[in-house]
Structures are given as structure tokens and as C-alpha cells.
Image: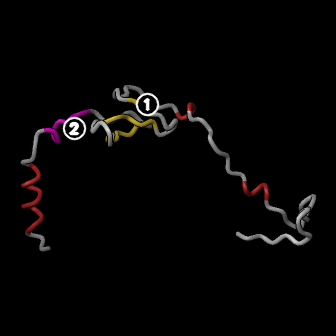
Amino acid sequence: MSSSDEPERKKSRAGEGDAEDEVEQQPELPKGWEKRMSRTNNQYYYFNVYTGRSQWERPTKPADPAQAELTAVQCAHLLVKHAGSRRPSSWRSDVITRTK
């Protein structure tokens, strides 16, 4: 496409419904919240990125990262056996090879 097409597209989009203008005029969401569209209700809801919970009402306060629930802990580095380990062999095998 040529660069002359770009202003026409912007011009045609600017004339689209007033709903877009209303969305742009709303204040920014507090930190830690995302606005998402419900597939079943076709309405917006608000998602707390720290807790994974959602609500229909627009949040007024920032989400608190301290309220995040730990669902998993990754500590694979603690499970790697090596020559300096207290027990460098496994009950399954005398020789341990690292796969990653």
C-alpha cells in the first residue's frame, strides 16, 4: 500500500461511532488492572493481574501486589545434582546426567 492510503484510513476511522470517544475519555485504570471483554456477556470486566480475580465494577484503587496468591514455586535449580552434592548419586542410577 502506498503512503497516500494512510490518511484516508485515519480519516474514515475518526468518523466512526461515539463509543470510541467515550472510551478514550475515561480515566486510566489504576495500576494492576486490565480491562477485558467478556465473551459470554459481551461486556467489559476488570481483571486484577496480581490475584487473577475479576470483577464487573470499575476499580478505583490500584491492585495490591502483596495480595497475590502464590500458586507455584519454581526451584528446579535446587534439585540439580552435581559432583559437589551431599548425595551425588540417585537411588535409580549411579550416574546422573543433566538433560537441560
How many C-alpha atoms fall within 10 Å of the one at disc 2: few (<14), some, or many (≥20)? Answer: few
Q: Which residue is mark 1?
A: 62
Where is residue 88? Give x, y as percent: 90, 64
Q: Name the secondary structure under disc 1.
A: loop
Where 75 falls versus 54 (above or below)? Answer: below
Q: Residue at x 34, y 41 (%)?
A: 36
Is 23 magenta? The answer is: yes
Amino acid beneath label 1 = Pro
Residue 38 coordinates in the image, percent (x, y): 33, 40
Residue located 38% across and 33% down the image: 30
- Compared with 88, 67 (above or below) is above
Between discs 2 and 1, the one toward the N terminus: 2
Label 1: how many Cα within 10 Å (few below 14, some 14–19, many 20+):
few
Q: Which residues are magenta?
A: 19-26
Q: Main secondary structure of the magenta part?
A: helix
Q: Quadrant of residue 1?
A: bottom left
Mark 2: which amino acid? Val
Horizontally, residue 45 falls left or right of residue 64, namely: left
Q: CA distance from mark 2 to mark 1?
A: 19 Å
Q: Position of residue 9 (x, y in %)?
A: 10, 60
Q: Which mark is residue 94?
A: none
Pointer 2 and pointer 1: residues touching (CB < 8 Å)?
A: no
Identified at 9% across, 47% down, the residue is 16
Query: Can you tell which mark lies on residue 23?
Result: 2
